[in-house]
Image (cartoon, rainbow, N blue to C red):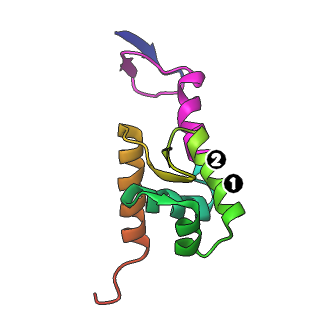
Amino acid sequence: MSEIRLPHSSEPHSHVRLERVPETDDFQVIANTFKQLCDTSRIRIFWLLCHYEECVLNISALVDMSSPAVSHHLRQLKASGLIVSRREGKEVYYKAADTEEVDLLHHMIEKLVEVSCPSKSE
């Protein structure tokens, strides 16, 4: 465990103990993931796919967007590893990837929606 003395601290024993200070590159995956969720439509599609497995046409109907627009968002989400797809005949179905990162993002989105959009019955 390394000990870092803080240069601008008035405390005589101001030290921070860290196992490891993560490198900037260690945060790149997180930054890339958050870039994928910087669009409200993409967040809605991701949230939907956390609950259901759907094809492009159904997703388009559910989020009231054109199929090409939905396909664009799906490509971005898939490239980032947040969703996966499977082919059934000519149709491709999408769903959220089964990863810890996806689970955390899904719960974070649901909690933030709950906080920012409280129920009208309250």
Q: Position of residue 77 (x, y in %)?
A: 58, 47
Q: Quick check: can you spot residue 110?
A: yes
Q: Is 12 or 39 nearer to us in this picture? A: 39
Q: Which of 50 and 84 is in front in this view?
A: 84
Quarter of the rendering containing residue 3: top left
Q: Is residue 12 visible?
A: no
Is 95 in front, or is 28? Answer: 95
Q: What stretch is highlighted in magenta?
A: 8-35
User: In the depicted view, which residue is nearer to us: 14 or 86?
Assistant: 86
| Residue of label 1 | 72
Query: Helix or strand or loop: what does disc 2 sit on?
Result: helix
- Identify the amino acid type marked 1: His
Q: How crowded is mark 1: few (under 14 residues within 10 Å), some or many (20 or more)?
A: few
Residue at the image position 59 percent from the left and 30 percent from the top: 28
Q: How many labels does the image show?
A: 2
| The N terminus sits in image quarter | top left
Q: Position of residue 74 (x, y in %)?
A: 60, 52
Question: Callout 2, which amino acid?
Answer: Arg
Q: Residues within 10 Å of mark 2 (few under 14, many from 20)?
A: few
Q: Could you tell me residue 47's position as x and y percent?
A: 45, 60
**Residue, disc 2:** 75
Vertical comparison of 122 with 90: above or below: below
Residue 117 pos. (x, y %): 42, 76
> Residue at coordinates 54% horizontally, 66% vertically from top-left?
59
- In terms of secondary structure, where does tag 1 sit? helix
